[in-house]
Image (spheres, rainbow, N blue to C red):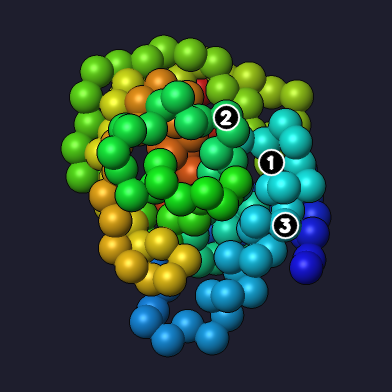
Amino acid sequence: MAIKKILSISQSEHILKAKSAVVQNNDPQLAEVVRDLKDTLLATPNGVGLAAPQIGYLKRVFVLRKDYIAPDIEDDSVVAKNEDPIWVFINPEIISEKGQLDEEEGCLSVPSTYVKIKRAQIVEIKALDENKQPFFTCLKNLGSRAVQQEIDHLNGILILDHME
Ligand SMILES: [Zn+2]
């Protein structure tokens, strides 16, 4: 296992502002990226989610901690039935959005900073799981905000970029 240092904007802005690449079918590094994301998020009790660029991999992968977002997941989704405490999303895409939230968000890469950000209240998302099987799920509230922040990370966007 490998717990990685979570990159912060003060030292690694160039990585955090870069756009991550789509994971290809036979990516030899994918297993390592997934394992390190899981290990690092499990070792970070205050973290809801973590995206690959935050630990230095510019690949479109993020993970969410199930404890925090369990109430925000559609009951019958594939993801809700997965008993792993960490959920893996590879090549995620938001396919629909509904409603609006306007709440303060923090980010592990931008320590001690909270920014009020308008986000969709509900997102429908398509991704591959860690076995590269496609799945769809719907998340609301904190789960929805977390997905939107993690996808922002994959596009090189940080919470500070949402400040008016
Ligand atoms: Zn973040």
> Is 60 situated left or right of 108 in this image?
left
Compared with residue 15, is residue 24 higher up or lower down, i.e. above or below?
A: below
Circle 3 sits on which residue? Answer: 39
Report how far apart the C-alphas of labels 2 and 3 lie in the structure: 17 Å
- Residue that appears at 28% across and 38% down: 76
Q: Nearer the viewer, residue 141 or 56?
A: 141
Question: Percent from the top left, x then y, of residue 162?
Answer: 47, 27
Amino acid marked by disc 1 = Ser
Circle 1 sits on which residue? Answer: 109
Amino acid marked by disc 2 = Tyr
Question: Percent from the top left, x then y, of residue 54?
Answer: 64, 53
- Residue that appears at 56% across and 52% down: 84
Callout 3 secondary element: helix
- Residue that appears at 55% across and 39% down: 66
Question: Percent from the top left, x then y, of residue 63?
Answer: 54, 50
Circle 2 sits on which residue? Answer: 68
Compared with residue 117, is residue 21 higher up or lower down, i.e. above or below?
A: below
Callout 1 secondary element: loop
